[in-house]
Image (spheres, coloured by chain):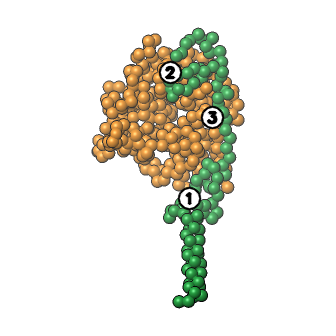
Chain colours: A orange, B green
Amino acid sequence: MGGLITGTNTTENSIKVAFNSGLILHLSDDGDLINRIDTTPFLEDFTLEKSNGGVRAALWLNDDLVFIYYTASNTTKDKFKIRAAIVDIKQNKSIDNIELGKFDLNEHYALGGGIDYDVVNNRVVLAIGAASGTDDTKTSSKAQDDSNLFGKIVGINLNIKKTKLSPPTIISKGHRNPQGLTLFNKKIYAVEHGPKGGDELNLVSQNGNYGWNNFSYGTKYIKPDEEYNRSSNKYIEPIYYFTPSIGISDVSKCPEIFSDPGYKNCLLISSMRDGSFYLSKFNPDQSYIQSMERVNFGSRIRKIEGFKNSVYLFTDNQSIVKISYSKL
Amino acid sequence: MNIKHFFSNTIKITIIAFIVLLLVAIGVKYQQPLNDWNNSTIKGEKKKSFANLYLNNYSPTSETWNLKDKMGEQAMVTNQYGREVSLGGANYRNKYNRKFN
């Protein structure tokens, strides 16, 4: 039995985990199961038909309401959509549901899924992938097309009660396959998979263009390797990139205990292929990275969270590893 | 050169050759790359899990919770890397009577 972890929420007393199958587990801070919720009956036309399908991201708006970004299909399963919903997991009902875009059967790759809540603007910030096929050089030009939401980071405003979704507005474009996103001191950071190499950490700015599918530090999926454009004033460079790819998977704030001078501006980055996580240390105004320190784990990490004195790793073999640090 | 002198030189050469070979063997056995200092433990530094140079200022402890036994009994197979994916509740299929591929 399995499933990919696509959303997490760590609080003082509990840990919540969402899977791409639509399952949500609610655990105590000791790891005991409190509740198990199946959200799929409340997700309109939910499908887990293809690779990367199902729930792509989940965000807890409060204890009861969960924002879910997922894939949907018609009954014949030849037309697909990406949708966003608010589900009340206490009363077991759908609160709101909107369509974000349509894609074809061969475009199930790179649907993205980074997500966080923007307190200042009362909005969900959601990173949507370019919806490419296996040959993403041909089919992912959507990321540069302002008429759709693919390959974009969007803001979805909520009403005061967080029960109504407004139409999405584009924050930035040119993203390939975002995997994680966090707001850190009012700045948006997102990580995304490059094509072959070129996994990126981006500092997201309003109306920024991050270059996909013209600009990347990865190479095309052809042999011999062929580079993308790596120099352009038109596109915003990643603030850090990994070549070869580490299989970048999530970004989160560092736990509060990492408070030594120089580590107050610190983000955690997790990786699947590299089986490790990284401490990325920023300069005081968080505009560039001063150091990137690798911590080996040895297994694929899908999601990561820093909370209080602990780093929580959510792995691809369906386990949670809580690493608690205390100062010597 | 008499025979005595010949054997004396031979013994000397043999001893020198043996010492050279011994030094080479020791060098091969304990050779380290030029940048080995990068991987070695610095005095005062402790090697431990979930740590790096900075995190050596901290003492990490870890615990692992397996979620598989908390995910319910029913599973469905998708082509998501050939994995089985949990349906959610144990009675999901009966309750909602929905079929998946």
Which class describes the residues within 10 Å of circle 2: few (<14), some (14-19), or many (20+)?
A: many
Which class describes the residues within 10 Å of circle 1: few (<14), some (14-19), or many (20+)?
A: few
Instruction: Identify the secondary structure beneath mark 3.
Output: strand
Horizontal and vertical percent position of residue B12: 58, 82
- Residue appearing at x 40%, y 21% in the figure: A105
Q: Return the residue at label 2.
A: A48
- Residue appearing at x 67%, y 27% in the figure: B70
Residue B4 appears left or right of A286: right
- From the image, state whether disc 1 or disc 3 is nearer to you: 1
Marks 1/3: CA distance? 30 Å
Q: What residue type is labelled 3?
A: Ser
Q: Return the residue at label 3.
A: A319
Looking at the rendered structure, the number of numbered marks drawn on it comes to 3
Marks 3/2: CA distance? 21 Å
- Residue appearing at x 62%, y 15% in the figure: B92
Q: Can residue A90 be seen in this view?
A: no
Instruction: Identify the secondary structure beneath mark 2.
Output: loop
Q: Nearer the viewer, residue B98 or B3?
A: B3
Q: Can residue B45 be seen in this view?
A: yes
Which image quadrant for residue B25? bottom right
Horizontal and vertical percent position of residue B91: 65, 15
Horizontal and vertical percent position of residue A239: 41, 46
Q: Return the residue at label 1.
A: B39
